[in-house]
Image (cartoon, grey):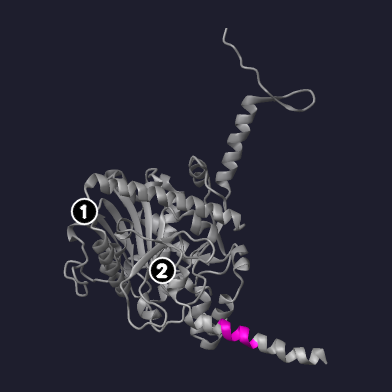
Amino acid sequence: MSILCGGPLLEGVYCVACARWAWKRCLHTAGHDSETWGLATAEEFEPVPRFCRYILAVYEDDPQHPLWEPPGGYGINPDWLILRRTYEDNHGRAPPYILYLDHDHADIVLAIKGLKFSKESDYAVLLDNKLGKRKIDGGYVHNGLLKAAGWFLDVECDILKELVEKYPNYTLTFTGHSLGSGVAAMLTLLVVLHRDKLGNIDRRRIRCYAVAPARCMSLNLAVRYADVINSVDDFLPRIATPLEDIFKYLFCLPCLLCLRCMRDTCIMDEKVIKDPRRLYAPGRLYHIVERKTNRLGRFPPVVRTAVPVDGRFEHIVLSCNAASDHSIISIEREAQRAMDVMLEKDDIMEIPAKQRMERQETLAREHREEHRAALQRAVTLAVPHAYSSSKYGTFNEVADSHRWSGESSLGSSKTRENWDELIERLFDKDESGHMVLKKPQRDD
């Protein structure tokens, strides 16, 4: 009798739990994921709207006679435009891009265009991937995006090296939107691993700003490269389902797409972190928050930033503005609004140059500490292939110089050879077979 009475009770509890989950899912907003993050400063966020305008300039057929420039223009001097490549120039291997020498900000910028729905070559790059297909530097990456980035590095390596050596005080920035942001992130990773191709450029001069990026690298790489890669969030990094599956479902059965996305969203976070093949948005995340729960319209945007390990935008947000918010025009507009709000609260232009430099040094130190804490957090959560950084910063530099891809172990074999030679020079074996330190030889 008690069992029969307990059946309806369990059923009621189950229904209440399902209703609660559905209610929380419908009320979940983008701001919930970043509510514990710190606020971004005007100094660190200043490049974002500027790079958005550079990306918009790639869409122009003639930058000297623009047709769709935003209010205030693109901020590009046509005389400083080094080169411009179209789909025809790239032969479908990569999206269009421009190389711009920004003397005003001491920066060498390579800006890459986003996905064009009418271009089959863009879909070919995006769909060229399977879960766990490509491994590099101890983690997994998107195969198609990595191949496109490799093409970029092969084609433009000489001119990038020439500019980097000609302007030793300039930074080297890769930026892009949507598909282009994934290629930019992969290109940054390759350049960091092969700095010798660009004249042994200092890692601190390399940076990337990925606007609305696709998931392109595993969690250990996303955290490890947070010191050089920055991502501006929108709905695309939140989609846990692989992009190649999404586009297949879009052309087949939309209902299956919905069920697949919901299934991926309901996976436990502990299980998600343990999967080494799962891809994430790369690097440090910047989140522009402009909407609130049960509120209509937009509010003055607030920018939050962090290097999260767990809870890294794993929840899909139900929004009717997802598609429009993904456009580079919308992101540029909201990023500029956020920048204007920050400048109003903090009169950065009126700060003396010396004090401004001190603030930048303090910000850089805080970012390094936050990055180190994220690496340690990844180790604590047992993220596959994650390791904490060396206290003195030398281990990562040595490791980066010897790691290239999962298919090649050339760097590691050279390292072992060097160690074997060093051991032979310093140690001998005694009669029992134990290693003993050699006695120093004196010159007569």
Question: In the picture shown, does residue 260 fall above or below 365?
Answer: below
Instruction: Identify which residue is drawn at 41% across, 54% down.
Output: 228
Question: In the picture shown, does residue 285 fall above or below 318?
Answer: above
> Quick one: quadrant of the C terminus?
top right
Observer-nearest of 98 and 335: 335
Crowding at dot 2, Cα within 10 Å, few <14 / some 14-19 / many 20+, comes out as many
Crowding at dot 1, Cα within 10 Å, few <14 / some 14-19 / many 20+, comes out as few
> Quick one: quadrant of the N terminus?
bottom right
Instruction: Identify which residue is drawn at 52% across, 69% down.
Output: 129
145 with respect to 161 (left or right): right
Q: Mark 2: which secondary structure?
A: loop
Does residue 72 show up?
yes
Which SS type dominates the magenta stretch? helix
Residue 123: x %, y % from top left: 44, 74
Does residue 407 show up?
no
Residue 316: x %, y % from top left: 49, 77
Q: Identify the residue position indicated by label 2 in the image.
A: 233
Tell me the CA gap for discs 1 and 2: 27 Å
Q: Mark 1: which secondary structure?
A: loop
Instruction: Identify which residue is drawn at 38% across, 73% down.
Output: 115
Residue 8 occupies which quadrant of the picture? bottom right
Question: In the picture shown, does residue 376 fall above or below 62?
Answer: above
Kindly identify which numbered label has been placed on residue 104.
1
Amino acid type at mark 2:
Asp
Could you tell which of marks 1 and 2 lies nearer the N-terminus? 1
Q: Which residues are magenta?
A: 15-21
